[in-house]
Amino acid sequence: MYGDEELGIPPTKLYTEPYARKAYESTIIVLTEADKLLNYMLRDRT
């Protein structure tokens, strides 16, 4: 990953644990919704 080159902030300081936690939680939400949609689409095909 990239840091902020203009401010001289390295990625280890820019991307902290709270940022990673929020990204992980958002990923779980997207995965859950995609799974629901896929199951809905497959159910209608049979």
Image: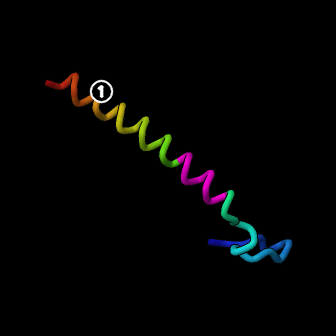
Tell which residue pokes out farthest to the right in this image: 7
Left-right relation of 32 to 6:
left
Q: Is residue 2 left or right of residue 24?
A: right
The total of numbered circles placed on residues is: 1
- Asked whether 24 falls inside the magenta stretch, the response is yes
Q: Residue 6: percent from the left, percent from the top?
A: 84, 72
Q: Position of residue 24 (x, y in %)?
A: 54, 53
Answer above or below: position of 40 versus 9. above
Q: Quadrant of residue 44?
A: top left
Residue under the image location 86 percent in, 72 percent down: 7
Residue shown at 51%/48% (left/top)? 27
Judge the density around disc 1: few (<14), some (14-19), many (≥20) Cα neighbours within 10 Å. Answer: few
Q: Amino acid at mark 1?
A: Tyr
Question: Image height check: is 3 above or below 28?
Answer: below
Residue 11: percent from left, percent from top: 70, 73
Dot 1 corresponds to which residue?
A: 40
Q: Is residue 32 above or below residue 3?
A: above
Which residue is located at x 67 percent, y 57 percent?
19
Extreme residue in the left direction = 46
Q: Nearer the viewer, residue 30 or 4?
A: 30
In the picture, the quarter occupied by the N terminus is bottom right
Classify residue 34 by image quadrant: top left
- Looking at the rendering, the stretch of residues picked out in magenta corresponds to 19-26
Q: Is residue 10 magenta?
A: no
Task: From the image, give the main secondary structure of the stretch colored magenta.
Answer: helix
The C terminus lies in quadrant: top left
Q: Secondary structure at mark 1?
A: helix
Percent position of residue 38, x then y: 31, 35
The answer to which image quadrant residue 20 occupies is: bottom right
Is 34 placed left or right of 7 in the picture?
Answer: left
Q: Which residue is painted at 22% across and 26% down in the image? A: 43
